[in-house]
């Protein structure tokens, strides 16, 4: 039974898109960041402060692997999830992956609007933030670009993104029924 993994950089709208998509498909919605916070009773921000990124990545990967048993689910990952360990291989083997591709300038705009604290960029703003987004995105795109479906999310609004995903999913979903 199908699982759809939404991947992409921080601030690219993975949770919003995943939630909308799951509602339209009648699937359950999961968000790796929320699963983490519920399971470990720490906000991701506080966990990073106390235990550091390496410890976070290990637990994040374990949580991703625990989605193996989910059925009829849309799973929004964290921005870094596909880029560590064998996580992208796991995603490819276990579901249909959708990359929300966004240019750094749009990511920057959206991060500035967002209230979610993001430990990797929290002390940065302006040109420094843009430079960090660019270099991190450059490193991560080799993972993101392995997704089954790539959505150019540059000019379209969130509702349109969901329609575009649904259209492209049709072929995959009819194969898996
Ligand atoms: C991270 C992205 C965050 C969260 C953590 C690390 C990253 O999720 O998992 O702060 O490495 O890009 P969002 O992509 O939902 O912001």
Image (cartoon, rainbow, N blue to C red):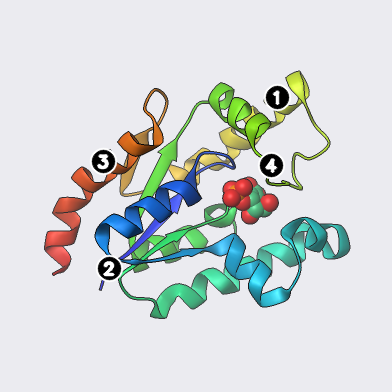
Q: What percent of the width, then of the height, locates residue 96?
A: 31, 58
Observer-nearest of 113 and 72 = 113
Element type where label 4 sits in the image: loop
Residue at 78%, 26% in the rendered image: 125
- What whole-number distance in Å separates the C-alpha atoms at marks 1 and 2? 37 Å
Q: Residue at x 57, y 26 (%)?
A: 104
Q: Nearer the viewer, mark 3 or mark 1?
A: 3
The image shows residue 126 at horizontal and vertical percentages of: 75, 21
Residue placed under numbered mark 1 in the picture: 131
Marks 2 and 3 in Cβ contact (< 8 Å): no
| Foreground of the two, 117 or 78 | 117
Q: Earlier in the sequence, mark 1 or mark 4?
A: 4
**Residue picked out by circle 4:** 115
For the residue labelled by badge 3, is the local secondary structure a helix, a strand or a loop? helix
Q: Is residue 67 above or below residue 6?
A: below
Q: Quadrant of the N terminus?
A: bottom left
How far apart are the two marked residues, 2 and 3, measured between alpha carbons? 18 Å
């Amino acid at each position: 039974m199908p699982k759809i993994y939404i991947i992409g950089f921080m601030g690219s709208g993975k949770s919003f898109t995943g939630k909308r998509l799951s509602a339209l498909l009648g699937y359950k919605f999961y968000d790796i960041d929320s699963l983490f916070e519920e399971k470990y009773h720490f906000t991701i921000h506080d966990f990073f402060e106390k235990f550091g990124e390496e410890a976070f990545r290990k637990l994040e990967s374990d949580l991703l692997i625990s989605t193996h048993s989910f059925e009829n689910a849309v799973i929004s990952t964290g921005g870094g999830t596909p880029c560590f360990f064998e996580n992208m291989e796991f995603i490819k083997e276990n579901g249909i992956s959708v990359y929300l591709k966004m240019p750094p300038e749009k990511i920057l705009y959206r991060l500035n609007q967002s209230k979610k604290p993001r430990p990797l960029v929290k002390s940065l703003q302006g040109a420094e933030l843009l430079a960090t987004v660019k270099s991190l995105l450059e490193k991560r795109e080799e993972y993101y670009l392995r997704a089954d479906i790539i959505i150019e999310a540059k000019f379209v609004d969130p509702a349109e993104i969901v329609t575009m995903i649904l259209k492209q999913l049709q072929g995959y979903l009819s194969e898996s029924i």
